[in-house]
Amino acid sequence: MIELRGVGHVYSAGTPWAHRALEGVDLRLADGERVVVIGANGSGKSTLAWILAGLLRPSEGTVTIDGDPIDLADGLTAMAFQHARLQLLRPTVAEDVGYGLDPNEADVDGALAGVGLDATSFRTRRIDDLSGGEQRRVALAGVLARRPRLLVLDEPLAGLDLPARRSLVEVLQRPSEMTTVIVTHDTQDVALLTRRALALREGRVVADGPVDDVLPAVAS
């Protein structure tokens, strides 16, 4: 169980440049649950994503996984960033997916298959020769290979052409034991990804529930 209680965050607190990004966020996520966090630019989505991934400690409130602080849960959380190329650190696909681990070939191939990439075709491909959609899936494979309890995806569909978008939606629709949080401002395919959505506006949760009920809260 992942739980947020009274979570808020202020950037540059105590300075003339202080800016509140989140306020009073309460959220509970069951193991294996999937939720989409939606909202306009500046609504606090990215700040919430970083906090959930344990990369940013909130100014207020608590974030726990099974009762322990999430920022101390080493290896239990992972995040795939919008700009996948910045997350790909090795020259070839297989080297990157297995980077920092001690995997065998089957582990790498399994992670690639999990994101819809044929290992025989992609294992030796150079990262810089991949399309944007392929890079995003390879970055996701590298995250999946680490088998986190909580996976946070930041704008996973942004900037993809229609075929790449459809392929990634199919990947994200697959059942998983991981708790998954998908952060996006794009509501086009939200209903295909999950039944639950959380809407943010100006750092506050304005709706949390079935996708069809939450979408009007973002549009209004």
Image: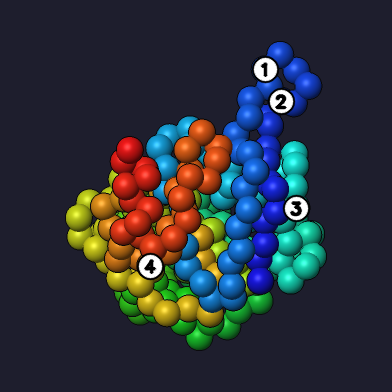
Position of 27 with respect to 167 (left or right) is: right
At label 1, the amino acid type is Trp
Q: Residues within 10 Å of mark 3 (few under 14, many from 20)?
A: some
Say whether disc 2 or disc 3 marks the residue closer to the N-terminus: 2
At label 3, the amino acid type is Thr
Tag 4's secondary structure? loop
Q: List the single residue furthest toward the left.
A: 162
Q: Quadrant of the N terminus?
A: bottom right
At 55% from the left and 37% from the top, the residue drawn is 203
As rendered, which of 138 and 196 lies closer to the eye?
196
Mark 2 vs 1: CB contact within 8 A: yes
Q: Residues within 10 Å of mark 4 (few under 14, many from 20)?
A: some
Q: Residues within 10 Å of mark 1 (few under 14, many from 20)?
A: few
Say whether disc 2 or disc 1 marks the residue closer to the N-terminus: 2
At label 2, the amino acid type is Ser
Pointer 2 residue: 12
At 53% from the left and 80% from the top, the residue drawn is 177
Indicate which label's residue lies in the foreground, 3 or 1: 3
Alpha carbon separation for disc pair 2 and 3: 19 Å
Pointer 3 residue: 62
As rendered, which of 53 and 106 lies closer to the eye?
53
Q: Position of residue 126 (x, y in %)?
A: 40, 59
Pointer 1 residue: 17
Pointer 4 residue: 195
Q: Residues within 10 Å of mark 2 (few under 14, many from 20)?
A: few
Indicate which label's residue lies in the foreground, 4 or 1: 4
